[in-house]
Amino acid sequence: MRSKLLMYLSLIILAVGLVGIYMTKTSLSQPPVDNTPVAPVVKAVPPEVYFSVWTAKQDLAKGSIISRDDLRIKQVTQQEGFENGIKKDIVLEFDDGMVVKKAIAKDGLVFPEDLVSPDERDYFSFAIEDGFLPVPVSVSATAVLGDVIKAGSLVDVLALLSTTQNLNGSAPARDLGSVSLKTVVNGAKVLQVIKNVPSTAAKSSGMLSLVQPSTGPQMVSLILQLTKAQAAKVTMASSIAKLEVLLSSDKNRNAQINIDAGDIVPQYRAVIELRPNSSGSQQSTPSITNPLLQ
C-alpha cells in the first residue's frame, strides 16, 4: 500500500515537472512585449496639381480680332481641368490679324482651336463679316505707303487716273494736266497682306481677282473686305487706273481725296469740260469729278 502511494506521488511530481518545463519553453519562444506607445501613421497627401489656362477679359464676338491684351492667364485645379477636357497647360501663340472662330463669353476658356490666323486656309470664313466679300487687290510694293498695313488695318483705295489715257499699265502719263487722284473706297478692312506674290497667284486662288498686270519684281496682294458695290467700283478703277493704298482709321475713313495735277504743279490747268450755255455758245468749266468713281 505504501509503495503504491509513493508511485502515485512520483507520477504526480513528474507530471508537474513536465508541465513546468513546457511552460518555460513556450514563454522563452515568444518575443518580449514592447509597451512603448507607437505614433499613428499619417498618409502623405500629394500636392495639388494646377493647369495654366487662358480666359477672355470681355465678351468676344465671332470674327473679332484678338490679341494677348484681350486674354488673361488663370490657374485651375487638375479636377477642374479634367472637367473641361484639359490635361495640361494651354499654350497660345498670337499672330497679327488672328480672329476667334466663335463667340466667347467673358471669363470663358480660350483654346488654340478657337483661334485662326491669316495664313490658315479657312481664315476668311471666320474673319469676314456678313454681307462682305474677300477681294484680292494687288498693287506694287511701293504702293503700300509706310509699310504699316497689316491684317485688321483700315485702308483707303485710291485711283491714279487720266482722262486721256489708261494708266493701268506701266506707261507714264503723257498729259499731266489730265491726271488726277481720287478716292475709290474708304475704310476697307484688310483681311490679309501677302507680299512677294506675282499677280498670277491671286488669279489662281478661286476668289474674285482684281489684280493688275505685274510689271515689277515685287507685288503686294491685299485681301480686302468689300461690299459688292465696292468690289464693282474697284474693278472699274483697276481696269482704267493705277491703284494706290493709304492707311485709314475710324476718324478719317470718310475723308475723300480728289486732287489733280493743277494742285501739285500750278502751271498745269485742271481738266476742262466744255458745256453749252443757255445762248447756245460753249463755255469751259473745270471738271474735277469722274462719274465712274462716284
Image (cartoon, rainbow, N blue to C red):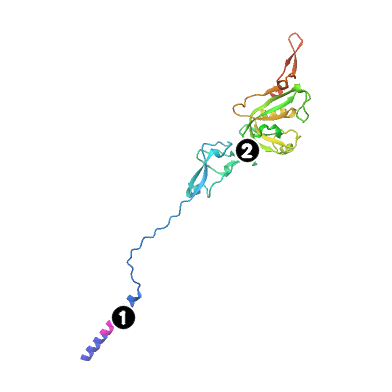
The residue that label 1 is drawn on is 21
259 lies above or below 36: above
Decide whether residue 268 is among the magenta residues.
no
Q: Which residue is mark 2?
A: 125
Identify the magenta region: 12-20
Q: Local crowd at mark 1 within 10 Å, few (<14), some, or many (≥20)? A: few
Left or right side of 51 for 241 = right
Measured as percent of width and height from the top left, residue 113 is found at 58, 44
| Image location (x, y in percent) of residue 78 | 48, 50
User: Of the residues shown, which amino acid type is indicated by label 1?
Assistant: Ile
Q: Nearer the viewer, residue 189 or 144?
A: 144
Quick one: quadrant of the C terminus? top right
Give x and y (percent) for residue 186. Answer: 64, 27
Mark 1 element type: helix
In 3D space, how far apart are the residues under numbered discs 2 and 1 (Cα atoms)?
99 Å
What number is the disc on residue 209? none
Query: Where is residue 108 shown, x and y percent of the image?
Result: 51, 41
Query: Who is closer to the viewer here, 87 or 67?
Result: 67
| Residue 259 left/right relative to 84 | right
